[in-house]
Amino acid sequence: MKTYPIVVSGSRMEDKAIKRVLTKAGLAWDGIEYSGQVTERRLKKLQRFAEAQDPKLTLRITNALGRRRADYRRRYFSNHPPDVGKRYICVYCGRWMKRDAVTVDHLYPVGRVSRDVKLQKKLERRGIRNINDPQNLVAACQPCNAGKANSMGFWILRGRIGRHPGLWFARYLLRMAVIAAGVWSVYYIITLL
């Protein structure tokens, strides 16, 4: 059975609440914090009980899957060659960027993955070994990366679809066709006058 490393901590005022939560879960409290391994079932019970007991009580899941590494940018560039010539394409908006302008983004956000066991399991099913896996890293422009922040939902969909450079070329060609059709129709109307 898989276990998850956790840390339970709080301020001195919460000691009784923490002790109750850990005792109910069958874990030992040393007076400062508890850190150790728990099963997923026990972890869910612990989270529910901690939330019901005291909203100030913090329960952190700490593990290698959800921890940002210092070399994730280098890892991205070593596994992803430029999309067009020497340029990368932002997966969210299609902007072309030089390598030094690229902000490498974690498609599934570090903050969310580090706290959510279900999300960790989802990543494992997708073959993503940890949050810094090249499959979870994408090229983004600075405004898109800042706009996405810790969000998921539609941003994940945009990122997964936007990884394919052909999509952005098709979009570009479609826009040019629409512009050309618009210019042609304006020319046609002017000649009729």
Image: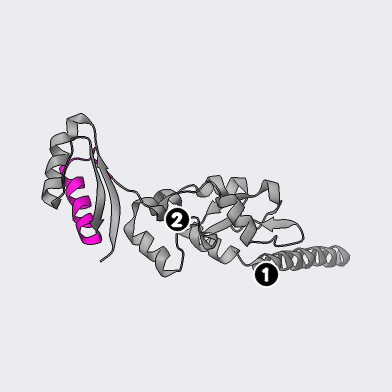
Quarter holding the N terminus is bottom left
Secondary structure type for disc 2: loop
Residue occupying the point 45% across, 69% down:
126
The disc placed on residue 175 is: none
Q: Earlier in the sequence, mark 2 or mark 1?
A: 2
Compared across the picture, whether 47 is left or right of 185 comes to left
Compared across the picture, whether 112 is left or right of 52 comes to right
**Most frequent secondary structure within the magenta stretch:** helix
Image quarter of residue 185: bottom right
Residue occupying the point 22% across, 51% down:
47
Residue 86 pos. (x, y %): 75, 57
Residue 191 pos. (x, y %): 88, 66
Residue occupying the point 25% across, 60% down:
40
The tally of labels here is 2
Secondary structure type for disc 1: helix
Bounds of the magenta span? 40-59
Type of residue at label 1?
Gly
Which residue position is annotated with label 1?
166
Residue 54 within the magenta-colored segment of the rendering: yes
Residue 191 within the magenta-colored segment of the rendering: no
- Determine the residue located farthest toward the right in the rendered image: 191
60 versus 155 height, above or below = above
- Determine the residue located farthest toward the top in the rendered image: 12
123 versus 15 height, above or below = below
Residue occupying the point 17% across, 46% down:
52
Type of residue at label 2?
Met
Which residue position is annotated with label 2?
152
Residue 112 appears in the picture as rendered: yes
